[in-house]
Image (cartoon, helix red, strand yellow):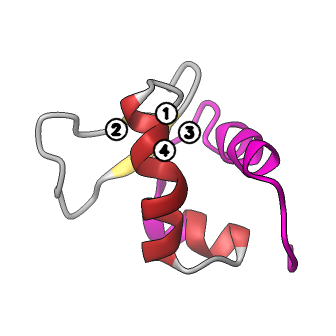
Amino acid sequence: MPGKMSKERMEALIVILCQNMWLTLNELSRLLNRDSKALQDQYLTEMVATERLQLKYPTIKNHPQQAYGSGNV
């Protein structure tokens, strides 16, 4: 998935990928071909804050197996 993608399309794609399953930051980074730090800073943190994504371990933000989900995970 090389090249520039609009923020809205990227967020929609992240939601789709995380639907009904948990994906870690590293898994999302590989699937989207994006730097993990940039992905977290530019998309994931805000998406969790606005409840478009859920954390697998919401009470332990830096859990070593932290993952992101959407929908019915």
Q: Earlier in the sequence, mark 2 or mark 4?
A: 4
Q: Amino acid at mark 4?
A: Trp
**Residue at horizontal 68 percent and vertical 44 percent from the top:** 11
- Residue range (magenta): 1-27
**Residue at horizontal 27 percent and vertical 59 percent from the top:** 65
Disc 4, disc 1: CB below 8 Å? no
Instruction: Indicate the quadrant where residue 40 lies.
Output: bottom left
Describe the element under mark 1 as helix, strand or loop.
loop
Which mark's residue is nearer the viewer, 2 or 4?
Answer: 2
Outermost residue to the left: 60
Q: Position of residue 6 (x, y in %)?
A: 82, 54
Between 69 and 39, which is closer to the camera in this rendering?
39
Outermost residue to the top: 72
Residue holding disc 4: 22
Residue holding disc 1: 53
Q: CA distance from mark 2 to mark 4?
A: 9 Å
Local crowd size for mark 4, using a 10 Å CA cut-off: few (<14), some (14–19), many (≥20): some
Describe the element under mark 3 as helix, strand or loop.
loop
Q: Earlier in the sequence, mark 3 or mark 1?
A: 3
Q: Amino acid at mark 1?
A: Leu
Between 5 and 58, which is closer to the camera in this rendering?
5
Which mark's residue is nearer the viewer, 3 or 1?
Answer: 1
**Residue at horizontal 39 percent and vertical 48 percent from the top:** 45
Q: Amino acid at mark 2?
A: Leu
Please tell me whether residue 7 is drawn above or below residue 54 in the rendered image.
below
**Residue at horizontal 34 percent and vertical 38 percent from the top:** 55
Residue holding disc 2: 55
Number of the label disc, if any, that sits on residue 21: 3
